[in-house]
Image (spheres, grey):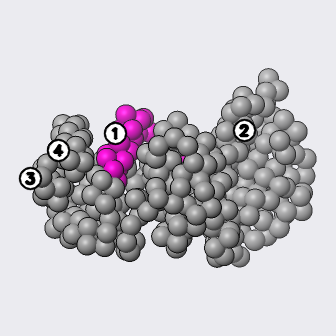
């Protein structure tokens, strides 16, 4: 691997993917990885992370939000750049812009491998990103499927990233086609199963029922709504069992979730007890069976499940 990387740009979904891929490669090489947020560092933190190893093992430092680095800590990086350690891999993550530009220019002078993460504006760029996301998860999607998904969610890369993760997990084996995408994202996308899930898990019953009606009226399949709620509950369950002191980016690979998804689940978990979460899982499992034919009125079954889950969260 190259010794120095620069992940540069403001698109968080692209940055997350680049960091996850580099982290996986570093772990394959048995690297000891240190993760730091630049804005949280104090004098000496970066120098310690970059100090030569007594045992000469391969090490790596991932330094995030470089634009927020305090002025007092910048010398630790510029000094290192004068004589980089060949056993050390350093990954700088910068959101771009003029903040911290002098340090950014100093890094560029040592010719790092630059991974561009600027916002994607062209449809072809977004489609290439979606295709790569599916391949990252070991799935293939047809050109029509990729185009349909970008058409539905292309204005928000992180929502697009979340949708790819869900579809890859839930779709049958084989190539993911346009029919499968249509099942997940029918009608207008202003209200989707994810909107219903968010309001439900937040305990906002009135908003959840409004979102549910809107999603159904715009053609969202009831099965996709139960799938979205079940997926959100699985995320809560995964995160609930993780160490609360471990940062989200360190758990991402272990849990198979993006850091922002982990942060979101942690925020939601503050209002959930283990018993309420177990009850919600049972409620959505019953609703899933009912909307697939076990009940004569799938809409009523959905409303009943959403009500039960939202009230369980809020303790009402």
Report which residue position mark 2 lands on. 25
Report which residue position mark 1 lands on. 237
Q: Answer yes or no: is residue 247 visible.
A: no
Report which residue position mark 4 lands on. 294
Report which residue position mark 3 lands on. 316
Residue positioned 67% across, 42% down in the render: 23
Asked whether, in this view, residue 114 is left or right of residue 197, the answer is: right
Query: How far from the left and from the top, in percent, is residue 48?
Result: 71, 40
| Relative vertical location of residue 46 with respect to residue 115 in this rendering, above or below | above
CA–CA distance between discs 4 and 3?
A: 28 Å
User: What is the number of the mark on residue 77?
Assistant: none
Lower position in the chain sequence, tag 2 or tag 4: 2
Residue stretch in magenta: 227-249
Residue positioned 75% across, 35% down in the render: 59
Lower position in the chain sequence, tag 4 or tag 3: 4
Is the C-beta separation of discs 2 and 1 under 8 Å? no
**Label 4 crowd bin: few (<14), some (14–19), many (20+), radius 10 Å:** few
Of residues 147 and 165, which is closer to you in this image? 147
- Mark 4 element type: helix
Looking at the rendered image, the disc whose residue lies closer to the viewer, 4 or 3, is 4
* Position of the N terminus by quadrant: top right
Asked whether, in this view, residue 1 is left or right of residue 198, the answer is: right
Residue positioned 51% across, 41% down in the render: 173
């Amino acid at each position: 691997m190259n010794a120095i990387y620069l992940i540069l740009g403001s698109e968080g979904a692209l940055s997350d993917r680049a960091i996850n891929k580099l982290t996986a490669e570093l772990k394959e090489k048995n690297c000891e990885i240190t993760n730091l947020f630049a804005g949280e560092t104090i004098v000496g933190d970066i120098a310690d992370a970059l100090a030569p190893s007594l045992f000469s093992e391969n090490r790596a430092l991932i330094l995030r939000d470089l634009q927020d680095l305090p002025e007092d800590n910048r010398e630790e990086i510029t000094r290192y750049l004068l004589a980089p350690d060949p056993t050390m891999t350093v990954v700088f993550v910068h959101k771009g812009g003029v903040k911290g530009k002098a340090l950014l220019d100093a890094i560029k002078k040592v010719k790092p491998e630059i991974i561009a993460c600027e916002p994607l504006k062209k449809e072809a760029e977004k489609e290439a990103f979606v295709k790569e996301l599916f391949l990252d998860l070991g799935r293939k999607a047809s050109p029509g499927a990729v185009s349909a998904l970008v058409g539905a969610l292309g204005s928000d890369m992180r929502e697009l990233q979340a949708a790819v993760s869900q579809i890859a997990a839930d779709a049958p084996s084989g190539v993911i086609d346009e029919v499968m995408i249509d099942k997940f994202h029918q009608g207008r996308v202003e209200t989707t199963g994810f909107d219903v899930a968010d309001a439900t898990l937040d305990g906002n019953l009135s908003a959840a029922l409004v979102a549910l009606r809107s999603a159904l009226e715009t053609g969202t399949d009831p099965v996709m709504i139960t799938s979205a709620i079940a997926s959100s509950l699985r995320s809560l369950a995964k995160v609930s069992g993780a160490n609360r002191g471990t940062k989200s980016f360190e758990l991402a690979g272990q849990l198979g979730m993006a850091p922002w998804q982990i942060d979101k689940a942690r925020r939601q978990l503050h209002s959930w007890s283990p018993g309420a979460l177990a009850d919600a899982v049972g409620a959505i499992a019953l609703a899933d069976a009912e909307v697939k034919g076990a009940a004569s009125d799938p809409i009523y079954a959905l409303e009943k499940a959403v009500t039960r889950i939202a009230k369980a969260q809020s303790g009402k």
